[in-house]
Amino acid sequence: MSAIAWTAVAVFAVAYVLIATEKLNRVTVALGGAAIMLALGATDAEHAFFSEDAGVDWNVIFLLLGMMLIVGVLKRTGVFEYLAIWSAKKAQGRPFPIMVILVLVTGVVSAGLDNVTTVLLVAPVTLLVCDRLGVPPVPFLIAEVFASNIGGTATLVGDPPNIIIASRSGLSFNDFLAVLAPFVAVVLVVFVLLCRIMFRKAFRYDPERVSKVMALRERDAIRDPRLLVISLSVLAAVLAAFVLHTLLDLEPSVVALLGGLLLLALSRLDPAEVAREVEWPTLIFFAGLFVMVGALVNTGVIDQIAHAATGAVEGKLWPATMLLLWASAGLSAIVDNIPYVATMSPIVAELVDGSGGLGKAQVLWWALAIGADFGGNATAVGASANVVVLGIAGRADHRITFWEFTKYGLIVTVISVALAVPYLWLRFFAL
């Protein structure tokens, strides 16, 4: 590698350590790292701000912004309080059944929407139900992030890396549904059982608080029925457009932003007040992180790592599958899985073509998808949904540290990726 590439690696490593140890504010670190990358020439304005593979992913930024505006308006209707009371009453106030409900809802909805949108909608409900029952919300929020990344793996539209893989491989929506959805359903069940063990200390039962919640009428929580009808109508239209975005020829980011601005106009609320609900530090952190990772892509660091790994096992399909699965999980824990998959896709395409292109060779695409999607659970910066939830928790005075998230994330990632080993063997080699 060139001197500038080594320098980019050093800058990224230092920034990552600072984010992980939380010695400095993560937004400061991300922006500082991005500025150094630009100053050193590891990237430039054209790549940082306009490149699809090595710059800020504006689709992610504006998707988040649009959905945050929608959530900001929805909060004023009382619908989150309604859902919190409803879910608590359905579970008879017992914390673990509530977690199961929230985790399964998050996992299933993430398969139809993107996982970031799902956690933006579920997190406010979680904070409210935990407050009502007097239980710590952090384990619930962490569990929901894991569920969103697992559930998003099931379909072509559930996680952005899957869209990139589908574009490169020619795999259809039904291919993803047939191969990944049954496996993801099994992983979600295992994950629920794992939650019972990992978060057992969070399941405190307070009979007095539960009795008060059971006495509440959820309908009384709705403060503005007119605004609720308008908000749900706009949200439904946005979600439908997400599903149909290929037919409409509109990017999900454009749909979300249009929906957020339309709802803001129809709500007659003060735009400045709604704008305060937007997680601006999270958006800025994403921009800085994208520039730093883009510098690694731009200087060829990720490309060299990918080529070295795949070159070592070329022509050996099962070893290649295992290396791709675990290496993708490991690298996606450190860098965002979107630029990683964008870099790896052409290499995997060559490997698949070299192995016949059909039948068993397709396993390489599924190994890439599972590894990249599940690997996002390993650390606090491994996936977009993780960063978003950490921002929401921080604003609600329930700070989640990098290591608090990661100590659970590593367990979930190792177990979920390990489950993929026998599944891929049985599906593509044994049967």
Image (spheres, rainbow, N blue to C red):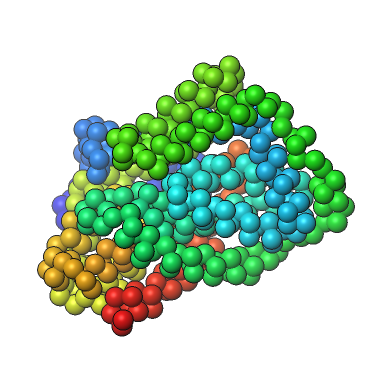
Residue 297 picture location, percent across and down: 24, 49
- Give the residue drawn at x 38%, y 75%: 423
| One can see residue 322 in this view | yes
Quadrant including the N terminus: bottom left
Q: Is residue 431 above or below residue 151?
A: below
Residue 134 picture location, percent across and down: 77, 50
| One can see residue 64 in this view | no
Quadrant including the C terminus: bottom left
Residue 422 picture location, percent across and down: 38, 78
- Give the residue drawn at x 31%, y 65%: 366
Drawn side of residue 415 relative to residue 340, left or right: right
Q: Is residue 333 above or below residue 355?
A: above
Viewer-nearest residue: 187 or 204: 187
Viewer-nearest residue: 350 or 36: 350
Drawn side of residue 38 relative to residue 252, left or right: left
- Give the residue drawn at x 75%, y 59%: 94
Residue 308 picture location, percent across and down: 19, 66
Viewer-nearest residue: 408 or 322: 322
Task: Tell me how many marks there are.
Answer: 0
